[in-house]
Amino acid sequence: MEKPSLICIGAALVDETYQCYSELLSGTSNPAKMHKSAGGVARNIAHNLALLENNVEIITHFGFDADGNWLKEECKNAGIGINHSLTNNTNTGKYVAIISPNGELYTAAVSTQFENQITVEFLETKVTFFKTASLILMDCNLSKESLEWIINFSRNENIPCIIEPVSIEKAERLKDIDLSKVLLITPNMDELKAINFHQNRNSKKTLIKNVIEKGVQFLWVRNGKEGSEIFSKELNHKQNAPQANVIDSTGAGDAALAGWIHAWLEGETPEKCVEYGHAMAKIVLEVHGAINDKLNINLLKENL
């Protein structure tokens, strides 16, 4: 068996984005252009990492349906290994986003069986495979029990573990889990509050300190147009947002995390990893969908 350098655990979805031609009106239909692509947070990250010539395997769920067959082919064509994923007689997940004319996400909806399929019992069948990883990335589409199992496994096996919170609701799954020795968590401010039991009265500094004191090595707080900040016990570094001709914001955060991981595996400093992340975000912001198919190592370096 070929040894993977990266294992991504999380959702793989069919993404449908509807970019409206004019200002959105509630309570009525809005003319829009539809774009279909492969999505899901962990899958997007895996796809970007594969385009950067990393060896990546995804643990996810596919249904025995047309969407599942299409999504599998998209993963294979991207260079993502899917041999350890689960396929069964349930629907493949779907994400539908409504995008404003300026490329910003207006609202979205998701339907997926993923959380109920990738269980602790399923994960336990993959222990031998997990031990081959040099890094494990997971998104919080997993259940709290599965998240906790992977974190504990990674800690016990000394495998670096990275967590992408995904959303406010799903970030709450981390609030009372032992996060010690987690390499990186990547929330926005609302997700950071959710990890902190929604302690809205606490200052940003206190919220960050609370997570670091749980034993998380790095906390990368993403602030959209305001850029991002990365923290550790010794580090407090702010990076301005990249200048981009924004077409579609879908997948920008996923691309940024893929850039951070790629740089980290190349031995870069945390600050330089953030720079790589911002470059990746710019590359994806300037195209429709969550992936820029033209991505390669040279394009990434050109945008640094």
Image (tube, grey):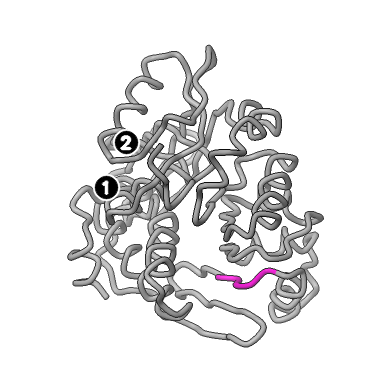
- Label 1: how many Cα within 10 Å (few below 14, some 14–19, many 20+): many
Q: Vertically, is 135 above or below 268? A: above
Q: Is residue 52 magenta?
A: no
In this orientation, which residue lies closer to the viewer: 183 or 231? 183
Q: Which mark is residue 126?
A: none
The reply to whether the C-beta atoms of the residues labelled 2 and 1 are less than 8 Å apart is yes
| Residue type at numbered disc 2 | Ser
Identified at 60% across, 71% down, the residue is 219
Q: Which mark is residue 37?
A: 2
Relative side of 294 to 250, left or right? left
In magenta, the rendered stretch is 216-220
Identified at 30% across, 37% down, the residue is 32
Image quarter where the N terminus lies is: top left
Disc 1 element: loop
Identified at 32% across, 43% down, the residue is 19
Gap between marks 2 and 1, in whole Å? 9 Å
In this orientation, which residue lies closer to the viewer: 65 or 149? 149
Q: Which mark is residue 288?
A: 1
View extreme (front): residue: 1
Toward which corner of the image does residue 253 lie, by quadrant? bottom left
Which tag is nearer the camera, tag 2 or tag 1? Answer: 2
Image quarter where the C terminus lies is: bottom left
- Label 2: how many Cα within 10 Å (few below 14, some 14–19, many 20+): some
In this orientation, which residue lies closer to the viewer: 93 or 85? 85
Give residue 41's position: percent from left, percent from top: 47, 46
Disc 2 element: strand
Toward which corner of the image does residue 147 lie, by quadrant? top right
Identified at 58% across, 26% down, the residue is 113
